[in-house]
Image (tube, rainbow, N blue to C red):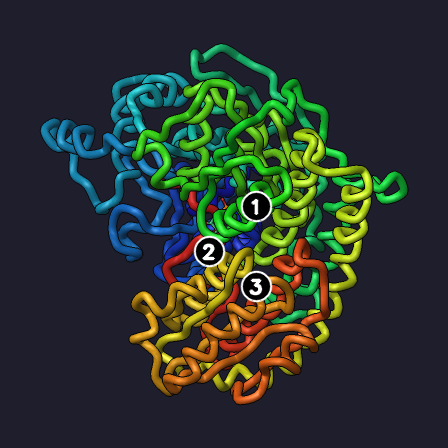
Amino acid sequence: MCGIVAIVGRDAVAQRLFDGLKRLEYRGYDSAGICTVHDGQFERQRAEGKLDNLAAKLREDRPEGTIGIAHTRWATHGAPTEGNAHPHIVGPVALVHNGIIENFKPLRDELIEQGRQFQSETDSEVVAHLVACEVEGGSSPEEAVATVLPRLHGAFAMSFLFRDHPDLVIGARMGAPLTVGYGQGENYLGSDAIALAPWTRHIAYLDEGDWVVARRDGVQIFDRSNQPVTREIVDSGATAEVISKGNHAHFMRKEIFEQPIVVAQTLQSYVRPFEGEVAIPAFDFDLGSVDRVTIVACGTSFYAGMVAKYWFERFARVPVDLDVASEFRYRDPVLEPGGLALFISQSGETADTLAALRHAREQGQKIAVVVNVPTSSMAREADLLLPTRAGPEIGVASTKAFTCQLAVLAALAANFARSRGRMTREEEREIVAHLQEAPEALTRALNHDEDIGAMAHLVAPARDVLYLGRGPDYPMALEGALKLKEISYIHAEGYAAGEMKHGPIALIDDQVPVIVLAPSGPLFEKTVSNMQEVRARGGRIILISDAEGIAAAGDGCIATIEMPKVHPLIAPLVYAVPVQLLAYHVAVLKGTDVDQPRNLAKSVTVE
Ligand code: F6R
């Protein structure tokens, strides 16, 4: 979603605010702006489109001043125009906002009735007006913010700047992240610690409902009842290097290539290789007593959950319900008290998943969370926290977080199986050995990068592409299709291979590439039969399989991608690589913006 940076600093802030936005650009990139206070006036620069447009404007005319706020936007209310770009200035108040003010309409009507005029179509501007009304009526900035916050419904992280207070930034959070950075004689606010990394690693994460008063010489945090509170200052561990592309042309490529290392790193927390055991953190709940698991997530994380459903049911014989988070609450699912609800998220801030988590808790569920950002809202609300250790994922298309999620979920499946008496010690030892093979298998899959690049021209001209798989390769087909559509803008669908004959096969002609994921194994023959049905109708097939599978069924395909032969448990991790690389190379060939595809944002903090 949107990204926020604020500095109450010692020297000129405009360039640093811009640099902070650069590190947050993955969160949203349809317009951006900065505002400072200088000589008792606001100085603002805003631009539509990517940050480069703002950079060009800043070269012409850069706001001066040692205090400022900045924003990179992912539009919700109002088109991504300069007029709707943040910061919004209303009288003595400037504001940047991430999230949605759900009751903005009655608030706006009320303000219009009072004669106030709006300059933008955004929901955010009502907040600037409300605070400005209070300040103009004689309230201090702190009183104004404290009065207005309880009137707002929805999700937000915000920063305010006050024209007549050149030593003050106020921030607030409810449902969207905001961190406080502590510097030497200056202080900062940011949507995440990465934004602040070059200036400080001393970070406090605000709790829901907190608001913060930041001055050069100190920071004071208040809770939702306006009581002063202390939030622990931690070392964020964020460094400028983790957010560089290294030698890679794109973050996405770098992150795809990091997978062997980060999967190994993640597995270290979940397996004891010498003992041949999986090791899930202690938890005041006996996994063996769980008789139903509810898995909820969005997008790529949902597909990780779908793979987990196969694993949990197969290995642990535990029934699993699976839902996309945006549907979960609204279908009012039946949740038996004491059940386990498992949420999967890279960011830990996805509004739909977070709302689903809170709903599940209200329904008496124990909450387990597989999450990549250990300081996120979901991590903090978990009973059982299962962190992935993928490191910051900057490319908007999720890659390494996904394979790390799969690694954790495979270990969790084995743990379930053991706790439910469904797995012998010998079988557990075998599973651990297979999991330990994953990083090397991922490296071998990555060795096909060049071959996959060379076949991108087979897919790039297509208008539609189908991905087929069976069993756990079905969610992988869905994931492959999602990767392709989001970064190359080619329409793609994933199908259970056996489902083709019930309708979608009508789409097949010689213009439609069909990507078949079929590792040799129990489902191979059935998948290949479905593949032949497609081929008989002129479909152009790219087969992703191992040497055995390609030898058996590769003839007549327009291309094949050979994966190492691996145990079915780790096949989904390994087969993630070719679908990621194919999408990547097709997007590069088409010249789209791989790391920041149109209309998307990395962390979706609106419902
Ligand atoms: C796709 C992608 C999205 C996310 C989804 C959930 O490449 O990245 O589909 O997976 O928005 O985000 P998280 O995992 O942060 O909850």
Q: Amino acid at mark 1?
A: Ala
Q: Quadrant of residue 416?
A: top right
Under 8 Å from ligand 1: the CB of mark 2? no
Horizontal and vertical percent position of residue 491:
36, 70
User: What is the quadrant of the C terminus in the image?
Assistant: top left
Q: Secondary structure beneath disc 2? A: loop
Query: Circle 2 sits on which residue?
Result: 62
Viewer-side residue, 601 vs 23? 601
Classify residue 305 as left or right of residue 102: right
- Mark-to-mark CA distance, 3 and 2: 62 Å
For marks 3 and 1, give the CA distance: 17 Å
Q: CA distance from mark 2 to mark 1?
A: 51 Å
Mark 2 vs mark 1: which is more N-terminal? 2
Residue in the foreground of this view, choosing between 7 and 258: 258
- Mark 3 lies on a secondary structure that is loop
Q: Nearer the viewer, mark 3 or mark 1?
A: 3
Residue 311 against residue 218 in the figure, above or below: below
* Labels 3 and 1: the sequence-earlier one: 1
CB contact under 8 Å: marks 2 and 1: no
Image point (33%, 31%), residue name: 154
Image disc number at residue 308:
1
